[in-house]
Amino acid sequence: MLYQRRCGILLHITSLHSDFGIGDLGKSAFEFVDFLSKSGQTLWQILPINPTSIHFGNSPYHSLSTFAGNYLIISPEKLFEAGLVKREDIEEIKVKRSNKVDYKVVYENKKKILYKAFSNFDIRKGEFEEFFSEQKYWLESYALFSAIREKTKKEWHQWDDELKKLKKQRNNKNVFERIKKEISDYFNFFVFEQFIFFKQWFELKKYANSNGIFIIGDMPIYPSYDSCDVWENPHLFKLDKDMKMLYVAGVPPDFFSSTGQLWGNPVYDWQEHEKEGFRWFLRRFSHALKLYDYIRVDHFRGLIAYWEVPSSEKTAINGKWVQTPFYSFFKTIFRNFPSLPIIAEDLGFITEDVKYVREYFGIPGMKVLQFAFYEEDSPYLPHNAERNSVIYSGTHDNPPTRVWFKNLDKNTKARLEKYIGTNLNQENICSHMIRLAYISPSCFAVIPMQDILSLDEDARINTPGKTEGNWEWKLVDLPDENISFELYELSKIYGRT
């Protein structure tokens, strides 16, 4: 349940300005916290910070682990400050600033600098050993998974049976220890990588919180098939005896797509989760609560009923709705975390059971202004927003508001102008949409940075269904003082400071 009026900005870490080709947890992140604070903002919403893969389009929603952090956003400058690399090492991997991430270059450069840092690090340090001990419940498996993946250069389902089913062989200590020994250097490197990531992350979070900034993190509903989670826990997903996917996740056909969306992630075996008392999910929430102040739960409706598509299908048309044991699930979650600060991504096809769960447990939902003007009395209109909600001009899946406005049909544009009470154009649409969000009853108002800056199509970060060119947009520099002042004034006027 949300109680206090706040405002903030949606900007992923990778989209921060940087000299290393991608936003990271270093200087630019701390500068952005300062910008938020000066601008009267108290919320910073980000996308998932788990490891990504170039083979899955660098999507933060197709992660190799639901627990690990993404090494791409580790700061080289902080490695230098820690004495792990030399100044010339980080100068070597600097790139010319641009508004796009070149992932191929970034993957190579970050791995290169991290290997140098690892070679200068003493893994016998008490802080390192303490970190491994505390995080062993997920970290040992992740480091093992990543080490084998690095050595074989293959996805886990392409490994030979001894490696593919290694988790089943834990009881055979001889086999298990032999394999660990064979890849010990790789194993220790990936533990080090996570040690550095979380050290840098918690330094940033501490700084943000000390400046009155709360971080809204993002929890993807499904891991990737090629993930440590699926490799380690095949029984928790609908796989066949050869550990291949029987079904994949997606959404049915709708107004936006006649064939629906086929995501390709494996779906959960909810009966197995329930048998284990939803232990895996409890661990996920516990882990996320340490990282974030609020947690946006992606595709919230999939925790109540999800669209299941046979893995042989080429589109999502022939899927079906499958209900989860949602009452038992949410009772268990809230019994363990009575004040769980989650936000439900409840967009799309929302049924009464989804509304019931959200209202029963007091979970705030989302309102998106770009969806508000296609009908006369849309639930997304600002005056229809309930207090316990988060309102956005758009999300990471929407075009920048300037682009959205340009493509509106005549009737929708007329409804929008009638609602706001003035003539609109591409130059003023963003400022009016920001005001609509700020003036609404919703406790939280979050605006994508693209709309703060009134940017065009080139700044779109994701187009659902598109396989290339997503997740690349980034800032070249921070916004200027004038924008900061305007945001501060708006936050004061509408009681969101």
Image (cartoon, helix red, strand yellow):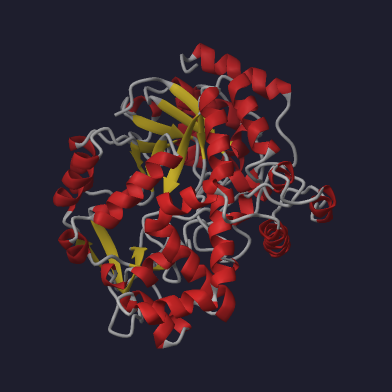
- Image side of residue 220 versus residue 28, left or right: left
Report x, y in % for residue 369: 45, 36
Report x, y in % for residue 35: 64, 26
Can residue 103 be spotted in the picture?
no
Residue 106, compared with residue 432, is above or below; it is below
Q: Residue at x 69, y 60 (%)?
A: 119
The N terminus lies in quadrant: top left
Q: Nearer the viewer, residue 75 or 348?
A: 75
Q: Nearer the viewer, residue 296 or 134?
A: 134
Residue at the bottom extreme of this rendering: 160
Residue 241, compared with residue 96, is above or below; it is below
Report x, y in % for residue 271: 17, 65
Q: Residue at x 82, y 47 (%)?
A: 87
- Image side of residue 182 versus residue 385, left or right: right
Q: Nearer the viewer, residue 460 or 50?
A: 50
- Image side of residue 346 versus residue 73, left or right: left
Question: Splitting the image into 4 quarters, where does residue 54 fall?
Answer: bottom right
Q: Residue at x 62, y 39 (%)?
A: 450
- Image side of residue 363 versus residue 405, left or right: left
Report x, y in % for residue 92: 83, 55
Q: Residue at x 18, y 55 (%)?
A: 277
Residue 475, compared with residue 37, is above or below; it is below
Can residue 290 be spotted in the picture?
yes
Callout count: 0
